[in-house]
Image (tube, rainbow, N blue to C red):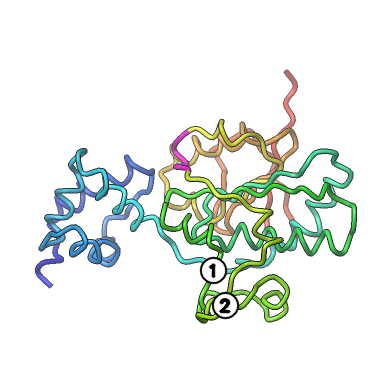
């Protein structure tokens, strides 16, 4: 439709805006993605064409619109226990290393989207604690962060419809960790919810206020950033990890040529990165 058409120069201006705001790099031919993500905002903000919406977005005075646009462009579908093996590695390889830790274990899900990853981490911890009582400090702290305020609200509610629940969640885990509601939704039970807190964070900003972590999940996120931005984010992850802490990236992601702060550990399957101990 003509009202959803963008000229090449408009698309390029929008690409530059998005990269400057949140580091995401759109390819040369992703106009279709911009149309599908931004078209629903046209009626909400009273504009007739996508071109007008983009022009208004470029104005620094349109704070509400700019926030809504970034929100729409950074929202990604996800699923429970995505790829399975990272959660098996967490349970079978990483958690045993923290046996006897006096303080609470801290884990960060650095792009929590609609909450499936941090809640999957919490379920994995609950299963581990049930099978090995007393092995870990019971007060585990899991922090989920995201740039999207609408996603964070969904995370905090912890309520999911049947379609979302069907994506990667076994019937056994649904029975164990969810409570069915009257509206066809099911919510994460209180024990799992208490393990996770959520905060707004742009990965381009400082992580200092989050404190230090033992394990960071940042999976299927770095693929959207330019190499220099990836390097900056990885360097900040290193600063945010305790000595010997671990970073888990997505299956198609690598930090080759981007950082000397980590040692790559090959697992079967998968790869994890451990913060390198440096002599000072």
In screen coordinates, is 109 left or right of 4?
Answer: right
Count residues near mark 1 (Cα–Cα under 10 Å), then give few for <14, some for 14-19, many for 20+.
Answer: many
Q: Quadrant of residue 256?
A: top right
Residue at image position (44%, 42%) is 202
Q: Which residue is mark 1?
A: 159
Q: Percent from the top left, x then y, of residue 280?
A: 72, 18
Q: Quadrant of residue 179?
A: bottom right
Q: How many marks?
A: 2
Of marks 2 and 1, the one in the foreground: 2
Is 193 or 271 nearer to us in this picture?
A: 193
Where the N terminus falls, by quadrant? bottom left
Count residues near mark 2 (Cα–Cα under 10 Å), then give few for <14, some for 14-19, many for 20+.
Answer: few
**Residue 171 belongs to the span the image colors magenta:** no
Q: Main secondary structure of the magenta part?
A: loop
Q: Percent from the top left, x then y, of residue 132?
A: 89, 59
Q: Secondary structure at mark 1?
A: strand
Q: Which residue is mark 2?
A: 181
Q: Earlier in the sequence, mark 2 or mark 1?
A: 1
Is 158 or 35 nearer to us in this picture?
A: 158
What range of the chain is rendered magenta? 201-205
Q: Percent from the top left, x then y, of residue 270?
A: 68, 59
Residue 269 in view, yes or no: no
Residue at image position (71%, 61%) is 191
**Residue 204 belongs to the span the image colors magenta:** yes
Q: Are marks 2 and 1 in contact (CB under 8 Å)?
A: yes
Q: Is residue 103 above or below residue 50?
A: above
Q: Give the spatial CA distance, label 2 vs label 1.
A: 9 Å
Furthest residue in direction front, as rendered: 182
In screen coordinates, is 225 left or right of 100?
Answer: left
Residue 60 in view, yes or no: yes
Q: Percent from the top left, x then y, of residue 228?
A: 44, 37
């Amino acid at each position: 439709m003509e009202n959803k058409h963008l000229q090449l120069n408009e698309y390029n201006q929008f690409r530059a805006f998005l990269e400057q705001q949140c580091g995401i790099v759109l390819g040369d031919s992703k106009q279709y993605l911009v149309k599908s993500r931004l078209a629903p905002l046209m009626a909400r903000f009273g504009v007739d064409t996508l071109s007008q919406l983009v022009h208004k977005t470029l104005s620094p005075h349109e704070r509400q619109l700019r926030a809504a646009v970034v929100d729409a462009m950074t929202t990604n579908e996800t699923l429970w226990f995505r790829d399975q093996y990272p959660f098996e590695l967490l349970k079978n390889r990483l958690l045993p290393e923290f046996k006897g830790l006096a303080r609470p274990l801290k884990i960060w899900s650095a792009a929590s989207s609609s909450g499936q990853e941090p809640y999957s981490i919490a379920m994995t911890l609950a299963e581990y604690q049930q099978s090995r009582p007393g092995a870990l400090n019971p007060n585990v702290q899991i922090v989920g962060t995201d740039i999207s305020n609408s996603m964070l609200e969904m995370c905090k509610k912890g309520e999911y419809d049947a379609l979302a629940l069907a994506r990667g969640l076994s019937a056994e885990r649904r029975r164990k960790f969810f409570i069915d509601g009257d509206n066809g939704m099911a919510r994460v039970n209180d024990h799992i919810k208490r393990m996770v807190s959520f905060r707004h964070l742009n990965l381009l900003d400082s992580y200092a206020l989050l404190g230090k972590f033992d394990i960071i999940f940042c999976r299927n996120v770095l693929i959207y950033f330019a190499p220099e931005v990836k390097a900056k984010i990885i360097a900040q992850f290193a600063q945010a990890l305790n000595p010997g802490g671990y970073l888990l990236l997505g299956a198609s992601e690598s930090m080759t040529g981007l950082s000397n702060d980590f040692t790559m550990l090959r697992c079967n399957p998968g790869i994890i990165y451990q913060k390198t101990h440096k002599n000072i």
